[in-house]
Image: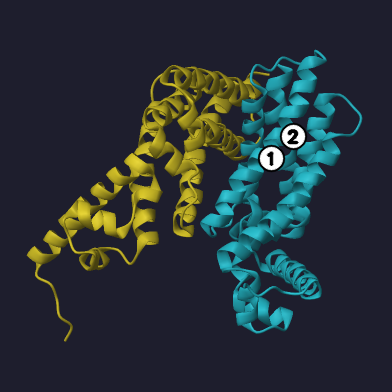
Chain colours: A cyan, B yellow
Amino acid sequence: MAYRHTPERQARDRAQREHVLQLALALVVEGGFASLTMQRLAKAADMATGSLYRHFAGKGELAAEVFCLASQREVEALQEVLATDGSALQRLRAGIERFARRAWDSRQLAWALIAEPVDPQVEEQRLRYREAYAELFAGVLREGEQHGEFRVSHPHLVAACMVGAISEVLVGPLSPQARAQRSEAQVEDDLQQVRSTLIHFCLGALAS
Amino acid sequence: MAYRHTPERQARDRAQREHVLQLALALVVEGGFASLTMQRLAKAADMATGSLYRHFAGKGELAAEVFCLASQREVEALQEVLATDGSALQRLRAGIERFARRAWDSRQLAWALIAEPVDPQVEEQRLRYREAYAELFAGVLREGEQHGEFRVSHPHLVAACMVGAISEVLVGPLSPQARAQRSEAQVEDDLQQVRSTLIHFCLGALAS
């Protein structure tokens, strides 16, 4: 007969796992996935490294869960702004601006989520979440089409283009090298440039 | 005194390494990075697995080298088409079309290069090569601006948007799941849709 944990023990395990995930996220916010090691996390959680492995099979699984935790918040933030009042074009614009603003406000995390080279398990989740962002943009594109705001032949493809453009244009300015060389004032200028380029690039084609 | 290999031995080593890299590329063309294992490669090269490690420290290094070998060809193909005669807009259009066409003609390889989840060492090279593609597009954007063909405030950012859009729009149709579900005829339709979406999305904003 398999040994079964009591419900109390299971609840305690779940709470501890959740707590550890939040600590892991804090490490990534601070120093990217490069800062997330089992050893450092064990220290932050005041646990033995071995106990961590009860919760996560390894660094790859842990990193993927942290990635999903943080990305889910981004998806929800985008969803919220895309669901506000206004024309489809206005909402797409607001969504792109919110995305860029959030990336700028948490640059280390944004870099980690968008581009930091990390385990293939994280890569798999990156593909999934990019699809989720694209689905949200595609929804608004379809609404704009239905209401005669603009013509768009393949909303899901245009939405993928938008997600690609947004991610890629952020990679350069958010990279550790770029951040190390820029003052706070320059960084704000960079955001303005990125924002106006994105709006023009992503929405200019719809208007034409 | 350190032991030194003879020049003949060094030349033989280099030739063998080059040969092994070509075999490794063939495995990736066939089945993506998932097919590239040290064991399978050793078999293809008719070598002991241990001998492979004389040439490559491990799978990550090997995969990164194969990635660079294949990506360098793509950069050169893009460079070539962007350097032909014609207006900047015509050349950008030709570059985008060539990129999509090449991806379609070698779909497994294109998926591996653009999106397959793989070692962080490959990820690092992906970032580098995306910058290289963007540099090429940025050069043509600057020429178009100089010749008064269009206005573009931040060519390097617009170029990054293009590279992001091109990559991301290919991810869905090139993915193994999509390929498994589509007939050859459908795949050609998909290419037409992707191509026309990309041209309109990437160049529409320039024209407006």
Q: Residue at x 68, y 65 (%)?
A: A28
Q: CA distance from mark 2 to mark 1?
A: 7 Å
Q: Nearer the viewer, residue B117 or B153?
A: B117
Chain bearing tag 1 is A
Is B172 drawn above or below residue A51 in the view shown?
above
Q: Residue at x 9, y 70 (%)?
A: B6
**Which numbered marker is on residue A153?**
none
Hey, which residue is sitting farthest bottom in the picture? B1
Q: Nearer the viewer, residue A159 or A197?
A: A159
Which type of secondary structure does the marked residue at label 2 adopt?
helix
Left-right relation of A55 to A85: left
Which type of secondary structure does the marked residue at label 1 adopt?
helix
Q: Quadrant of residue A206?
A: top right
Q: Is residue A72 in view?
A: yes
Give coordinates of residue A39: x percent, y percent: 61, 79
Q: Residue at x 75, y 57 (%)?
A: A106
Give coordinates of residue B204: x percent, y percent: 63, 20
Tell me the amino acid under the disc marked 1: Ala
The tally of labels here is 2
For mark 2, what is the residue?
A136
Is B146 drawn above or below residue B39 in the view shown?
above
Chain bearing tag 2 is A
For mark 1, what is the residue?
A132
Q: Count residues near mark 1 (Cα–Cα under 10 Å), then give few for <14, some for 14-19, many for 20+.
A: some
Q: Quadrant of residue A51?
A: bottom right
Tell me the amino acid under the disc marked 2: Leu
